[in-house]
Amino acid sequence: MRLLGDLLELVLPESCAGCGAGHGLLCGDCAAQLTAAARPAWPSPAPAGLPPPWAVAAYEGAVRAVIVAHKESGRTGLAGPLGSGLARGALAAGTEATGAVAGPAPLLLVPVPSARAATLRRGHDPTRRIADAAVAVLRREGVRARRLCALAQARRVADQSSLSAVERIDNLVEALAVTEPAAVRGRRVIVVDDVITTGATLAEAGRALRAAGAEVIGAAVVAATRRRR
């Protein structure tokens, strides 16, 4: 399915994934929304243990449409611009935590894992894909970076979409585990995902990585949901 999606993008004229206008993967106006400077993206309230989160856009309008198209509609070519935004967030997280991202050890981006059923349904793991794209961007900019898929689901969880912030935290307690503790022990890592809403998923990822001995210096996402009370 992933290969089919890539081929269709090459041969079929599609409208912009963000606004639906014209032809092409992403128009200039929508692409520009993914190139803003990264900024802190703390939810309110923030769950305990949430690594300092950074995002480049709000999860609304064209940005939301682009993320959904990449995740659910097989428009895998969108990983490039989404990964560019994620790279900017990872750079901000690394620089804020350490003062510089360059060093003898590579910057490790650890994507939040998708559920196996969701990956099979979609034909790809969207977070892993944009993490790979972000690593490629960072390397082109001279930053040593690597994607490390160190997390896996330890148990089944309920669908998060209808849960409150507190319910999401309860739903994700010890839901993730590190598959390769030796690969993260004593290493500085940044947790990455496409969107932050309540921060519960990133907090759980941070907990699992710290339990395995990693130093979680931050979190990076493409977009953050605006919380409305």
Image (cartoon, rainbow, N blue to C red):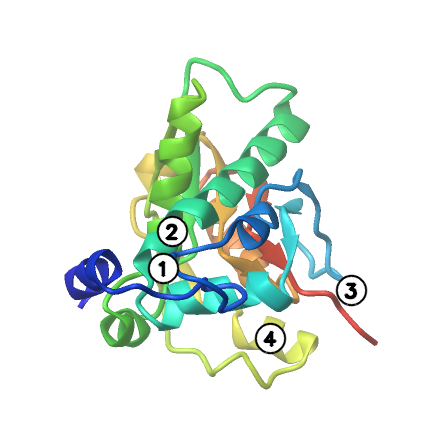
Earlier in the chain: of badge 1 and badge 4, it is 1
Q: Which residue is mark 3?
A: 45
User: Going by the picture, which residue comes out furthest to the right?
Assistant: 229
Q: From mark 4 to mark 3, how far is it between C-alphas? A: 12 Å
Q: Position of residue 123 (x, y in %)?
A: 23, 68
Q: Which residue is mark 4?
A: 168
Element carrying mark 3: loop
Q: Which residue is mark 2?
A: 79
- Residue drawn 22% across the image and 56% down it: 10
Element carrying mark 4: helix
| In the image: residue 203, left or right of residue 187 | right
Element carrying mark 2: helix
Q: Quadrant of residue 6?
A: bottom left
- Residue drawn 35% across the image and 39% down it: 147
Earlier in the chain: of badge 3 and badge 1, it is 3
Earlier in the chain: of badge 2 and badge 4, it is 2
Earlier in the chain: of badge 1 and badge 2, it is 2
Residue nearer the viewer, 41 or 32: 32
Element carrying mark 1: helix
Q: Position of residue 73 (x, y in %)?
A: 35, 72
Q: Residues within 10 Å of mark 2 (few under 14, many from 20)?
A: many
Q: Quadrant of residue 131?
A: top left
User: Going by the picture, which residue comes out furthest to the bottom?
Assistant: 162
Q: Position of residue 203 (x, y in %)?
A: 59, 57
Mark whose residue sits in front, 3 or 2: 2
User: Going by the picture, which residue comes out furthest to the top?
Assistant: 104
Query: Can residue 99 be seen in this snapshot?
Result: yes
- From what the image shows, is residue 29 above or below residue 195? above
Q: From mark 2 to mark 4, how far is it between C-alphas? A: 27 Å
Q: Residues within 10 Å of mark 4 (few under 14, many from 20)?
A: many
Q: Which residue is mark 1?
A: 126
For the residue marked with disc 2, what is the amino acid?
Answer: Ala
